[in-house]
Image: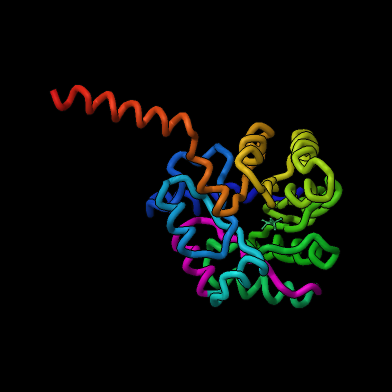
Amino acid sequence: MVQSTEPKTRKLWGRAVAAGNAGLYSSGTMKLFLDTASVEAVKEIAAWGVLDGVTTNPTLVAKEGKNFRKTVLAMCACVPEVSAQVTASDFEGMRKQADEYSGWHEHVVVKVPMTIEGLKTLAYCRQKGIRTNTTLVFSLNQAILAAKAGANIISPFIGRLDDAGQNGMELIAEIMAAWSHYDFDTEVLVASTRHPRHIAEAAQLGAHICTVPVDVFRRLPLHPLTDLGMERFRKDWESVSGS
Ligand code: G3P
């Protein structure tokens, strides 16, 4: 049985809250991460007081075209957890990158792919106290293996399952049901979300974390009836405030 890392997570979260950078009431709720390599986007959403972390991947980093280490460090100043993905595919290469990235900042979580070499890397990292997030999880069996190898977080990609003609959220339901029988301390992060409904459904299933692309995150606070209500309040107030 792997040892709980919850106290460390809570400590990091508490420190970020003290710095005014994390969701003030996020302890004990589903954590919300931003899926991006844009530091500007992280600063924008962190200012809302609801952001608990960031996930990046090589595709997102390539899109921004900025220095990877500097990007990760700038994000670590804003939020308590930043997933930085290894680019090697063999154990030796991933182990070296895990050692390197985890030395950058204590908020770094090393993102490792769900492969056999990745499993070896997860076990190595757990033994060294390096926090990890397992990416590219597409089945319950992969989720179980990653958790048993010592992953702190697993990231099932629900949008890509939807794209392939499956129901991605059913995998989250399967994982949460299995988790309810055991003492895994591995958090389930719903990744590859594509629309606001994915976030609501992840919360209904009790997922620990949901990572959200910037354009979807910006849509989460919006509702047309809120806008209409605001407009009516404004007009009604104007009609009396002028008299
Ligand atoms: O967090 C994983 C995410 O970046 C993958 O999203 O939209 O490329 O499937 P997507």
Residue 67 visible (yes or no): yes
Q: Quadrant of ligand 1?
A: bottom right
The residue lying at 68 percent from left, 63 percent from top is 111
Q: Is residue 95 left or right of residue 234?
A: right
Quarter containing the C terminus: top left
The residue lying at 52 percent from left, 50 percent from top is 52
Q: In x, y percent, where is residue 137? A: 78, 53
User: Which region shows up in magenta?
Assistant: 70-90
Judge by depth and name the residue closer to the eye, 184 or 63.
Answer: 63
Let me know if residue 83 is in the magenta part: yes
Judge by depth and name the residue closer to the eye, 229 or 50.
Answer: 229
Judge by depth and name the residue closer to the eye, 45 or 27.
Answer: 45
Residue 224 to residue 56: above or below: above
Q: In x, y percent, where is residue 159? A: 73, 49
Residue 148 visible (yes or no): no
- Kindly indicate the quadrant of the structure image that contains residue 198: top right
Q: Is residue 27 left or right of residue 55?
A: left
Let me know if residue 14 is in the magenta part: no
- Kindly indicate the quadrant of the structure image that contains residue 129: bottom right
The residue lying at 40 percent from left, 51 percent from top is 47
